[in-house]
Image (spheres, rainbow, N blue to C red):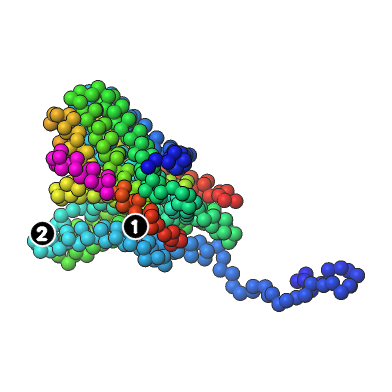
Amino acid sequence: MYDPTVARLTYRALLGRRRALILGALPVLLIAISVAVRVLAGADDQVAADVLGGLALATMVPIIGVIAGTGAIGPEIDDGSVVYLLAKPVKRPTIIVTKLIVAIAVTMVFSAVPTLLSGLILNGNGQQVAVAYTVAALVASIAYASLFLLLGTITRHAVVFGLVYALVWEALFGSLVSGAKDLSVQQWSLAVAQKVSGGDLITSDVGLPAATVLLVVVTVAATWYAGQRLRSLTLAGEE
Amino acid sequence: MAVEQPLAPSGEQTRIHNIGYRNYDGPRLGRAYARRSLYSQSLRGAYGLGRSVKSKVLPMLLFVVMCVPAAIMVAVAVATKAKELPVDYTRYAIFLQAVIGLYVASQAPQAVSRDLRFKTVPLYFSRPIETVDYVRAKYAALASALFILTAAPLLVLYIGALLAKLDFTDQTKGFAQGLVSVALLSLLFAGIGLVISAVTPRRGFGIAAVIAVLTISYGAVSTIQAIAFDQNSPDAVPWIGLFSPITLIDGLQTAFLGASSSFPGGVDVSSAQGVVYVIVVLGIIAGCYGLLTRRYRKVGL
């Protein structure tokens, strides 16, 4: 279920040239802000939780997930070069799983590592805040990457829909309609973070068992359906 | 025409026949007409008019999402016979900044990235338009599209307020202030969106980059503002607001357009700081225009 050549091509498509720049700029910004906050405010557990929750988990992880998840397959479908890949004797679910693994790895490296670093800078992992949010970022990376990879196979406007989900659904609807929080990757990963930290700094609206089940179901279902979509892919011309 | 003359001066049988091509001697519409056409086509394109049904969905949806809250507010104000509208004209765009951001992110790359990707830019410049014409037409089109998006709900609010027989002078003043504010916002956002998306021929990447710049800068600025406010240094709050587009507009209209700021604690922006805000906003707009002109000076040629 893993094809090294497909993986190598995907890595190059994701990290080549300017894409790597924007992927790298976000973590650098997060760490710069953490340093600024630490200098301005000193070490404070609540501030650290706010910055990591509001900036890292709510904004940075979804955006990196969108870029890596849709970027792993979207451009190829968009410019039609995916037919050369599909024409090779490689199973399409294998292609999807390989691309998913690459997307997850890239999202994890560019979101969880900076989250851990900035957590350490902010309060030196007091009350396990840094580790808890890092775990949340890791978990969220898997779910986001598989969701957005699926979007990349469904629609040409995957980036827009991915961002609408990440920014409008999770941020806006989540704060207005409490029911929307049950269907939010961010809340599911927060449930995991809550368990890790054990304190009351990090809270989630979803229980841990439900969150775990939903995360697994979403990831597996999205990956399976993306494979199905790729099996019956028709290349449409530019609108 | 030269084709009538025999090729060799000695008058042999070889000659080029005149097969009846004629010169165009109708009216030449010229540079201004080409620029106007590019402007109107780009403006229509920003709302998906003249494009496929699929590409109409998103801009129209965002337009509706912008206007519906205004209609609801008006309905509530009329039904409850309120003395004033539940939201200031100037605050409306700040509330719905996510929608505006998504609109810029989806339509700015649409306006320029595809021309780069399909290498149609040289074709534009084979017409009598210059680099500045292309940049001005695209900039003006996106800014107008944004202005329509942001001013339409204000118009809904204003008409509703007049129908509800609220104070005329008060409402007109607020409406005018709101229009100035969204006009500046449109210019600022259009400039930032176009500069970012003119760098890449990939539409999806342009969308992600624009939204990342808008969201991350706002997230970073509001986080640092909140912390600065908590650390008892509210004086720093307006200065931090200079670093993201939406807080720039927020601070500017707080200083000069009678708005109340959305900064933490409702920190006020003094007139001196307001001048800095104006300078920065105008500087960014001019800078975006300059960068775009530079970008297109030798693109694809």
Residue B23 visible in the snapshot: yes
Q: What residue type is labelled 1?
A: Phe
At 51% from the left and 48% from the top, the residue drawn is: B293
Residue B112 visible in the snapshot: no
Q: Name the residue under label 1.
A: B147
At 42% from the left and 41% from the top, the residue drawn is: A3
The secondary structure type at the circle numbered 2 is loop
Q: Position of residue B93 (x, y in %)?
A: 26, 52
Q: Same chain for the residues at labels 2 and 1, yes or no?
A: yes
Q: Where is residue B156 in the image (x, y as percent from the top left)?
A: 23, 63
At 78% from the left and 69% from the top, the residue drawn is: B2
The secondary structure type at the circle numbered 1 is helix
Q: What residue type is labelled 2?
A: Ala
Q: Mark 2 lies on which chain?
A: B
Which residue is farthest bottom?
Answer: B20
Q: Quadrant of residue A52?
A: top left
Q: Quadrant of residue A209?
A: top left
Could you say which disc has been placed on residue B82 in the image? 2
Image quadrant in which the N terminus of chain A is located: top left
Image quadrant in which the C terminus of chain A is located: bottom left
Could you say which disc has been placed on residue A84 in the image? none
Q: Which chain carries label 1?
A: B
Nearer-the-camera pick, A106 or B97: A106
Mark 2 vs mark 1: in front? 1
- Disc 2 or 1, which lies upstream in sequence? 2
Nearer-the-camera pick, A192 or A18: A192
Q: Check residue A212 for magenta coloring.
A: yes
Quick check: B31 above or below A78?
Answer: below
Disc 1 crowd, CA 10 A, few/some/many (<14, 14-19, 20+):
some
Q: Specify start and end residues of the magenta stretch as a single range.
A: A205-221
Nearer-the-camera pick, A138 or B251: A138
Q: Is the magenta stretch mostly helix, strand or loop?
A: helix
